[in-house]
């Protein structure tokens, strides 16, 4: 699906309606890790991923980390605005990388 030089920056809507931000080289694997509660982020203990809301691609490890930090520094309103402004692009990436099966609640991002 991806190579080590193609990093994703993503946001996931959680079961308690929070938005989690992370990076990965394999979105499908990372989703499964978050959903299993075993290898995913501690954040998902007691929560479950519901919907892939935002996806950026074509990052290096360095640029993905910097972008993740920038997004995590945003307040909730700024994150929602970013998600809203990027819905079409996110849907294209979801289709391109065949990630439709990740969304448990809807095929449209948050």
Image: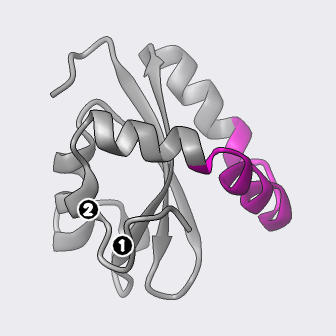
Q: Main secondary structure of the magenta part?
A: helix
Measure the C-alpha gap from mark 1 to mark 2.
9 Å
Whether residues under marks 1 and 2 lie with C-beta atoms below 8 angstroms apart, the answer is yes
Residue located 24% across and 16% down the image: 4
Q: Secondary structure at mark 2?
A: helix
Q: Could you say which quadrant of the image residue 92 lies in? A: top left
Residue that badge 1 annotates: 49
Q: Nearer the viewer, residue 84 or 63?
A: 84
Name the side, left or right, on which 5 lies relative to 10. Answer: left
Q: Residue at x 16, y 48 (%)?
A: 29
- Residue behind mark 2: 102
- Image-based side of 11 in relation to 93, left or right: right
Residue 37 falls left or right of residue 66? left
Give the SS element for disc 1: strand
Q: How is the image coloured?
A: one colour
Mark 1 crowdedness (10 Å alpha carbons): few <14, some 14-19, many ≥20: many
Position of the N terminus by quadrant? top left
Whether residue 86 is situated above or below residue 4 in the rendered picture: below
The stretch in magenta equals 70-87
- Name which quarter of the figure residue 100 lies in: bottom left
Give residue 94's position: percent from left, percent from top: 35, 45
| Residue shown at 23% from the left, 36% from the top | 26
Residue 78 magenta-drawn? yes
Residue drawn at the location 16% of the way across and 68% of the way down = 38
Q: Earlier in the sequence, mark 1 or mark 2?
A: 1
Residue 50 located within the stretch drawn in magenta? no
Of tags 1 and 2, which is closer to the observer? Answer: 2
Q: Is residue 3 above or below residue 20?
A: above
* Res 37 seen here: no
Which mark, by number, is residue 37? none
Image coordinates of residue 82 in percent, x first then y, are: 73, 49
Specify whether 99 is left or right of 85. Answer: left
């Amino acid at each position: 699906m991806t190579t080590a030089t193609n990093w994703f920056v993503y946001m996931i809507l959680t079961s308690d309606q929070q938005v989690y931000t992370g990076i990965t080289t394999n979105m499908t694997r990372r989703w499964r890790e978050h959903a299993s509660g075993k290898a995913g982020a501690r954040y998902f203990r007691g929560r479950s991923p519901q919907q892939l809301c935002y996806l950026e691609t074509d990052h290096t490890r360095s640029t993905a980390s910097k972008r993740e930090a920038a997004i995590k520094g945003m307040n909730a309103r700024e994150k929602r605005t970013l998600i809203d402004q990027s819905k079409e692009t996110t849907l294209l990436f979801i289709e391109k990388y065949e990630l439709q099966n990740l969304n448990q609640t809807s095929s449209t991002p948050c």
